[in-house]
Image (cartoon, coloured by chain):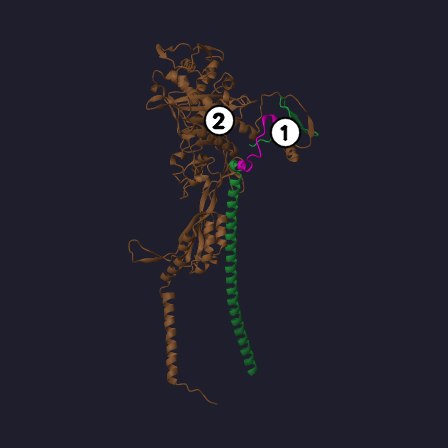
Amino acid sequence: MSEAFVSNHRIRLVSGFVAFAFCVLLTRLFYLHIWEHEALSDYVMHNRKMINVVEGRRGMIVDAQGNLLAATQATYTVGVDPQSFDPKELPKLEKLASLLKLDVVSVQKKAQLQISKSEQHPRAVRLIRWAVLAKGLNQSEYASVMALKIKGVYGNRVYNRSYPAGTLAAHVLGYVNKESVSVTGVERHFDFYLRGQDGWRETERDGKRQELAQYRGREVPARDGLNLELSINQMVQYFAEEEIARLAKEYDPAGISILVSEPGTGALLAMANYPTYDPNEFYNTKKYPIANQRNRALTDVFEPGSTFKIVPAAAALNEGLVGVEDSFDTGFAQISYRGRRLSLPADHRTYERLSMREIVVKSSNRGAAHLGVLLGEQKLHAYAAAFGFGSLTGCDLGGEVPGVLHPIRQWDGLTITRLPMGHALSATPMQVHSAMSAIANDGILMEPLLAKRVFDGDGQTVLRFNPKPVRRVIQSEVATTLCSMLADVVGEKGTARRAAIENYQVAGKTGTTQKIIQGRYSNTHHVASFSGFFPANKPELVITVVVDEPKLKGVGYGGTVAAPAFRRIAEGCIQYMGIRPVDVPADLFATQSYDRPAASLYTSWR
Amino acid sequence: MDQNKQTSQFTLLAALAAVIMITVMSAFVIVWLQQQISRTAQTTKRVESELSETLRKVAHLDALIATRHQPAFLQGQVMGKLRPARDAQIVWVNGHRQADGWAYTHYKPYRSNGDLAQASLQRFR
């Protein structure tokens, strides 16, 4: 049996080396874990620890029927990492290019170009880690891209606000920009409720910067934003915008505003303007100039013209100064007022005598001036202010202007005769609409209501916005009398015959205003308007149409341009909302008993 | 004497073996626990990720549905196939609940013809 020879010297040398190595290791460990413990542990923790932000989603905006108008959606920016891309997968790029609607050659070039040269230092190069291929891919498009399983091709998720309805109700909704800042519309006005509150999570990551979920520590959960239900009705809004498109095509105007609301609550069912924009493409100022974002119904003022005549008429009746059949001598061009001779405005034809009713029906400027003189400055101004002229209506959108209703001390000698015909003041379409709504609402001025409620993710109401009456402007009886007078405006002898709807009694007032161009009233630039409601004896809807500078042969009268638009919108609303012709006598025609209500009978018949 | 010594040696060895075994087992248990915690955390993370993915898909689908429900889109779908009901086609009825069910009356002068369209009285507000 042989025995291996082991040199004592060699054993000692190896043992000593191993012992030394251990000593070095122990010393290093001692240094790292005890001597430099604090500094190094801070360094390690700094590298390992991370705070993940958990994004709170912005709430939705829906219309009165729950149709989605604005929501937050994930979109993807897809790119390629040329360092990870495998050239064997080049054939897959053809499919990728077709999915992204890109040129195959450019995609192949981006996938294979691994370095880029600096422009400042031509000899310096850097590795390309990310080359963007396409932006704004939606969930399904991104899923198709990822299904190709191309190594190095992936996307980064970003959350964007999307508006599925496109241009529909754009001015009402407003938009949220790329920096997640709400800019206009209800997005801005109700930002406090809509915006979510981001949460955060303390966690750790490994060397590959992947989260180690087991080391999650403190966590503050994200809180999603609340949702907003508007009073806007998508279908009514569509009727209004369809009509705007028709008017724009026919008259090529400078601007159009259409408002539809319920007089009883002040709830706006539609608010549409021309020109408009798509909030999904707010940044595309070539396609949608920035001026298109203006909500003209609230920001643009015009001289209301004859639509304002409801104010002196209502005031004179409310003060008991005139009766409906009292007549005025409208054949003279001058009138004596407080010891002065004042010239009266002309009508498009001369009327010798007009009754109070006829002044409204025929929209007589001279007759309105008589009413103004009868009222006097104080009362005329007080009623104009009471109807909401010269002050904000309180609509829940930014940018509203109060218009101009000059204080009496600034009136010149003619204002008392010009204000009653809607000159010498300026108003927004919303103010004209509110004033007409007050008459339709039994004399009570309501604040426009745009938001119905704020609700949480479970649909539970968090905050409800109730109708707000501002003030009673005129007595109920006067409002009823005025309604019947305004119904005659839409009658055979009135100025708004084209607003008439078969079987429905419509009431309203036309307005045709000359615009002031270079300091003078122009004969070629007009604002055509019509504000009315129906059914006249039980108003369900108030509709106001204002068309700025319609281009047509002759004068763009309110009765010619705006009244037909009113009728078409009203007819659409009648069909859609089931508005009944209330003045038809309820003569019994047939009776039959069923065990179900009518709506379910209809369903079963289908 | 020897027997006592042997007994105490055995006891000592047994105790030592037990301590070592418990220590080793505890170490394994701790490792197992850590692994389970890690696995559970990973599962939770995956479920969270799937949940948010599902929510994103739902949001995308909602937006898609909303786009398809746009009046303009719907009108495009039925262009030339449907038209609004004419006034004469609409029969307005009043509903009254009675003991034996619902009774309906409808108005003159609207005369019904064979080509009827029923308007639901349920208001959209």
Letter of the chain in brown: A
**Residue that numbered label 1 is attached to:** B116
Percent position of residue A497, x then y? 50, 20
What crowding class fits label 1: few (fewer than 14 Cα within 10 Å), some (14-19), or many (20 or more)? Answer: few
Q: Quadrant of residue B122?
A: top right
Percent position of residue A348, x then y? 42, 15
For residue B36, the mark is none
Element under disc 2: helix
Instruction: Mark yes or no: residue A344 visible.
Output: yes
In this picture, is A335 found above or below A168?
above
Letter of the chain in green: B
Same subunit, labels 1 and 2: the answer reads: no
C-alpha span from label 1 to label 2: 27 Å
Q: Amino acid at mark 1?
A: Leu
Which span is picked out in magenta? B74-96
- Based on the picture, tell me whether residue B80 belongs to the magenta stretch: yes
**Residue that numbered label 2 is attached to:** A565
